[in-house]
Amino acid sequence: MTNYEVRPEQVAMMDAVQTAIATSDVCLIEAGTGVGKTLAYLVPSVISGRQTVVATGTKALMDQIYGKDVPFLNNVLAESFTAVLLKGRSNYLCLTRLKEARVKISSLNDEDRAILTRVRKWALRTDNGDIAELADLPEGTPMLRTLTSSVEDCGGRMCPDFADCFVYKARARALKADLVITNHHLLIADMALSEDPGGPILPAEANLIIDEAHGLEDVATELLGRTLTSHQVSELGKEVAELAKLERTFHGFELKNAASGIVKGFAGFLAALAPTDTRRKLESNNPKAKALWHELDIDLEAIELRTLEIAKELDRAPDVSTKTAQARALLAEVMVGFDTNLIRLVERKGRFGAVSALPVTVSEILEEKLFLTGRPVILTSATLTVDGSTEFLRSRLGVPEGAPELVLASPFNFQKQAIIYAPKELPAPDSALYFEHFINETMSLLTATHGRAFVLFTSRAAMLRATQAARSELTLPILCQGEAPRHELLRQFKATKGACLFGTASFWEGVDVVGDALSLVIIDRLPFDPPDDPILQARVELLTEAGRNSFKEYNIPLAVIKLRQGFGRLIRSRTDRGIVAILDSRIRTRSYGNIFLRSLPPAPVLDDLEEVKDWAKQNLKKRRRR
Ligand code: SF4
């Protein structure tokens, strides 16, 4: 292998993966930035002679493995292997939905008609039906969403288009491939939806590598719970209205009324539960919402029963009836709260909203269905530990007791490559004086590094306020999350000299900017989840009821992992240098601050801004001369 640099950490990881595969163990491996973890798990997996599934948390990592690591390994390994990139069904064109849309083309507006014409032409030449190939159509285009399938409306093997179906062709390729690269969503969906209409999604016996494993609990919580959105209700209303057209009797009239009734009814019900934009625990003792739910349920019941009869008469799958029954069951769950292990929550943003019932914990189901299946499972990430221990993630994810672990530090020289600026004297973040001090510090830091910075916020309001202040005081190019799609902002950031990117949650992880373009990461506050977040509240309550210290055992470890992810954006290669500024004095003044500092890479910690500016002058300037 030319240009291969032996890294002892990478070799240690390969050995650990090989052992886990040989013994069918569950194993945790934290591999700091620069270890080369993807090759360290791919090599022993593909030469093991067993099938392997790699599930990642981000699309960027899926693309890197499939587009870069797989072709590289197929070049250098003695025996070549087959690899398939497998996404969720909403990423593939559904041929049945396409046919249905063609029938209705005359009722579409000009924009949707143009999109449909475009998709029809593309459908004739695409090999795999992945709608990402239609790159110039914005992600989430509503018309595109109507051309994909869901588990409920897919006929599976009974579908007349099954033989040519892109979803099932991709899955058939995956079941035979040596290596399947997928995401956490599909992994959990495969685990949870044992009744997918087309059979299993992923090879059940394969080695399983879960990369970016620190994010698995969030995905499992979402997918193992149930949610009903206003969009789903409006889609259901449209499907019911279509069926109503087939009814020439009085039932058709009734069904049509019920279809529009559920859309209006759900909107009114949501408004009663959440009069303003929110995301909070649902209060079921709300008499107005209760009355509206009962009215809504009458319409839903009529739809459920009548559409079941129609499906029988027409010899069709009862998908509309099934979806309606599921909606009724979820509404009853959120209003009555039959299952005390579920968090019931309501979300509202403008005209849109949702109600959900999500599991408080997912550890038991993950342990049973993912980890105790007798196959090798390797959980890996750059951030599995808190203060050197994997205990937090082990307990959150239900990793079986005694599962071996390996913690591999980054091979980068953080003592020389980075500094942490954590000033003690800043007002606390909840003080009225905080913002002014934060902005002053941020302006000084951005000036010292000539921009080239990520400024990461824990709230959108703070990000917008700081963006406005920075734009009025600095001549540096300031990019702000929300002003363009995420990938476009990143492209502009890399292409623009001295750019500063102000962002929230989605820029804390999965972003890779190597080199001079990123020399400073500013963090406004320690990334504790907001105390009114309903999921956090339910988990805190559960721990408190069990007599445990929820702040120490849940809030702090969760925030430490997020901070480590934010820090990880800075140093991506042996030649990168830079500053991480944590402008939250609690990291220096509170006793728990040391847990955060000890969990970060071992860079010197400074609290004098002048020293930081000197460091920037010496270190960042040197880099520009090279
Ligand atoms: S099998 Fe399902 S996804 Fe495939 S074409 Fe038919 S309905 Fe669409």
Image: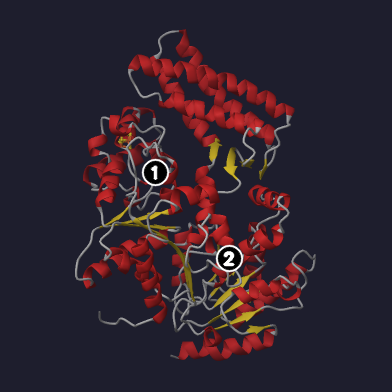
Q: How crowded is the residue under tag 2: few (<14 C-alpha within 10 Å), some, or many (20+)?
A: many
- Residue at image position (41%, 22%) is 242
Quadrant showing the C terminus = bottom left
Using the rendered view, name the quadrant where residue 72 is placed.
bottom left
Question: Which mark identifies residue 90?
Answer: 1
Query: Disc 2 vs disc 1: which is toward the camera?
Result: 2
Which residue is more in the foreground, 461 or 499? 461
Per the image, the residue denoted by label 2 is 561
- Residue at image position (64%, 75%) is 597
Above or below residue 369? Residue 403 is below
Using the rendered view, name the quadrant where residue 591 is placed.
bottom right
Q: Is residue 99 left or right of residue 380?
A: left
Question: Which color mode does the image show?
Answer: secondary structure
Which residue is more in the foreground, 18 or 189? 18
- Identify the secondary structure beneath mark 2: helix
- Identify the secondary structure beneath mark 1: helix
Q: Is residue 35 left or right of residue 621?
A: left
In the image, residue 18 lies at what x, y percent?
35, 68
- Residue at image position (35%, 36%) is 113
Using the rendered view, name the quadrant where residue 266 is placed.
top right
- Residue at image position (34%, 42%) is 200
